[in-house]
């Protein structure tokens, strides 16, 4: 007996504007990463100076970026040729996916409505413009999806069904058909799926969705865009209450939530150090070019203030006063290098070293400025889950 096709969706191929943007940006990044490998050697041929130590992180980062970009190109081209397909019929769902990267054997499933336990609406990450942890909350584009939980002879299984964007009418057709067939509709805003890199396995997602008390009913009435905000508010209320109970029971959890990750600390230390190192190198070279003989501390203070604004901005979520001690340790490190280099790099290098000793009188300026910055309003869409 044939079954009428209600809706079908195939992952779209990147075309037009986004394809141009992708190849333009990645091509530019490839040229930049190649220059990060080549330029240190050119500087070494031109100068023999202590400042060359600051090129080592650029050299390592250049190699890493080259490898990452080539891998990204390979993965992108493969995914464009192997795109998933989802079909909604009157009494079943059919899917075709390519779960194993670089393997040409697809996985096909047929799920009859009689075997569906529940459908959980959620989000998946489409692309990440700025990684979370690089610039605080980052910048993420997400889209809606279904986790379809169903039973087989082997037990309960999970099937992911993705939609292209929040305004896609196809997801409303699926919602209406699920309601007509009296399939329970739930909602969970925790992001556990992304198309660019794995977060969790299907087994882990299924285990979480079956055991969690965070799932809320999805009150579908008109459309995903209109009905999702109320479901999100209900989910956030449960999530907040759960977090408050856990932190009241164990205050250490609150302290841990307010701590920055090791990755965040590395980024927040390395980027300001590299910025200040480049500026210090340029200032001392200009000082030699114009034969500056005075050990002026103003360039050093200006450089350390600029680095401080960047350092505290990267850590502005949960900013603490004792972070000034960490930043001053970075300033002293640069000042120590400046004192060593003063013999060959001129008077301004000595001035930068002296500025590091005077900087405690100014370190509060970038700290207070960043501390008083208004916090952005909470995003209506949840951030990536911290698994």
Image (tube, rainbow, N blue to C red):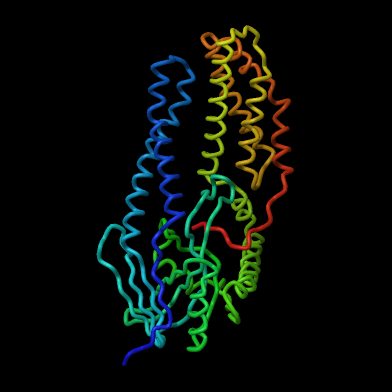
- 273 up-or-down from 71: above or below: above
Q: Residue furthest bottom?
A: 1
Residue plotted at (49% across, 60% down): 125
Image quadrant in which you'd find residue 302:
top right
Residue plotted at (40% across, 87% down): 91
- 1 up-or-down from 167: above or below: below
Q: Residue 377: x percent and y percent?
A: 69, 56
User: Dividing the image into 4 quarters, which one contains the N terminus?
Assistant: bottom left
Camera-nearest residue between 65 and 385: 65
Residue plotted at (43% across, 28% down): 56
- 269 up-or-down from 254: above or below: above
Camera-nearest residue between 297 and 252: 297
Image quadrant in which you'd find residue 233:
bottom right
Q: Residue 36: x percent and y percent?
A: 42, 31
Q: Is residue 261 left or right of residue 43?
A: right
- 302 up-or-down from 291: above or below: below
Q: Is residue 258 left or right of residue 181?
A: right
Q: Residue 82: x percent and y percent?
A: 32, 63
Camera-nearest residue between 209 and 293: 293
Q: Is residue 345 left or right of residue 204?
A: right
Image quadrant in which you'd find residue 16:
bottom left
Q: How many marks?
A: 0
Residue plotted at (51% across, 66% down): 165
Q: Residue 166: x percent and y percent?
A: 54, 68
């Amino acid at each position: 007996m044939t079954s009428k096709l209600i809706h079908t969706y195939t992952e779209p191929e990147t075309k037009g504007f986004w394809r141009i943007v992708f190849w333009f940006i990645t091509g530019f990044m490839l040229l930049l990463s190649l220059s990060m490998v080549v330029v240190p050697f050119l500087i070494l041929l031109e100068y023999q100076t202590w400042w060359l130590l600051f090129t080592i992180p650029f050299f390592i980062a250049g190699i890493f970026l080259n490898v990452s970009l080539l891998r990204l190109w390979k993965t992108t081209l493969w995914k464009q040729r192997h795109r998933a397909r989802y079909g909604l019929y009157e009494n079943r769902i059919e899917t075709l996916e390519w779960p194993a990267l670089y393997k040409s054997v697809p996985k096909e499933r047929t799920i009859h409505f009689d075997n569906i336990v529940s459908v959980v609406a959620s989000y998946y990450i489409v692309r990440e413009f700025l990684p979370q942890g690089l610039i605080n909350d980052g910048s993420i584009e997400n889209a809606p999806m279904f986790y379809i939980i169903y039973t087989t002879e082997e037990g309960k299984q999970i099937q992911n069904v993705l939609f292209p964007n929040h305004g896609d009418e196809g997801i409303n057709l699926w919602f209406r058909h699920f309601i007509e067939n009296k399939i329970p509709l739930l909602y969970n805003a925790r992001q556990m799926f992304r198309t660019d890199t794995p977060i969790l396995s299907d087994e882990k997602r299924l285990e979480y969705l079956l055991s969690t008390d965070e799932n809320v009913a999805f009150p579908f009435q008109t459309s995903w865009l209109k009905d999702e905000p109320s479901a999100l508010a209900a989910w956030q209320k449960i999530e907040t209450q759960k977090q408050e109970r856990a932190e009241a029971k164990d205050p250490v959890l609150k302290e841990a939530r307010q701590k920055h990750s090791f990755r965040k600390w590395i980024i927040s230390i390395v980027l300001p150090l590299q910025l200040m190192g480049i500026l210090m190198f340029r200032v001392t070279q200009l000082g030699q070019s114009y034969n500056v003989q005075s050990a002026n501390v103003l360039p050093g203070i200006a450089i350390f203030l600029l680095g401080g604004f960047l350092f505290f901005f990267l850590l502005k979520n949960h900013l603490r006063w004792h972070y000034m001690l960490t930043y001053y340790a970075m300033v002293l490190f640069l000042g120590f290098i400046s004192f060593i280099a003063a013999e060959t790099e001129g008077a301004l290098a000595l001035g930068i070293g002296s500025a590091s000793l005077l900087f405690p009188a100014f370190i509060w300026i970038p700290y207070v400025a960043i501390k008083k910055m208004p916090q952005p309003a909470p995003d209506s869409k949840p951030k990536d889950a911290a698994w």
